[in-house]
Amino acid sequence: MVDVTLDDSDGSTVVVKLQTETWELNIRAPLADLARLHDIRQADWASRRSLAVGTCAGSPVFWTANEDQATILIGHDDETWDIGISLPIETVDEIVRLAGERI
């Protein structure tokens, strides 16, 4: 299970905090960009489609899906990332829901 929270960062972005007992990931993005993640199921990695939404540690964040899993790729691009994390696609649905409540 991945806990999801949205914290205010500044007037134009929020921080998405994804957290488990063993790791935490913070992604900064505008709310409108986070709402675009409702299309995550069309961002099929096998077809080389991803959604560029947010930044983490100064690098772009790319989102892809494969069946019931989402993958977050952090790095220069979606082909040569530095960090990759897989999580349940329902976690991305929760991000979209929380972003929608704030728009």
Image (cartoon, rainbow, N blue to C red):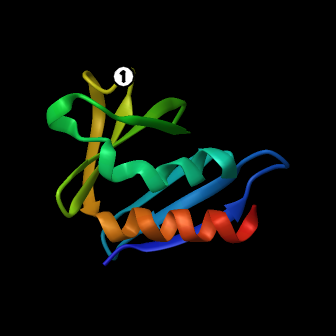
Does the image show residue 56?
Answer: no
Q: Nearer the viewer, residue 47 or 52?
A: 47
- Count of numbered circles in the view: 1
Measuring 35% from the left and 64% from the top, which residue is drawn there? 23
Q: Position of residue 29 (x, y in %)?
A: 62, 45
Q: Position of residue 103 (x, y in %)?
A: 75, 61
Q: Quadrant of residue 80?
A: top left
Q: Position of residue 59 (x, y in %)?
A: 48, 29
The amino acid at mark 1 is Asp
Task: Tell me: 68 left or right of 97.
Answer: left
Task: Tell me: 96 left or right of 103.
Answer: left
Q: Helix, strand, or loop for circle 1?
A: loop
Q: Nearer the viewer, residue 17 or 90?
A: 90
* Quadrant that contains the N terminus: bottom left
Measuring 36% from the left and 73% from the top, which residue is drawn there? 2
Does the image show residue 23?
Answer: yes
Q: Quadrant of residue 93?
A: bottom left
Task: Tell me: 99 left or right of 42.
Answer: right
Measuring 26% from the left and 43% from the top, which residue is drawn there? 84
For residue 63, above or below residue 81: below
Measuring 32% from the left and 41% from the top, which residue is drawn there? 43
Q: Position of residue 71 (x, y in %)?
A: 27, 49
Residue bearing mark 1: 77
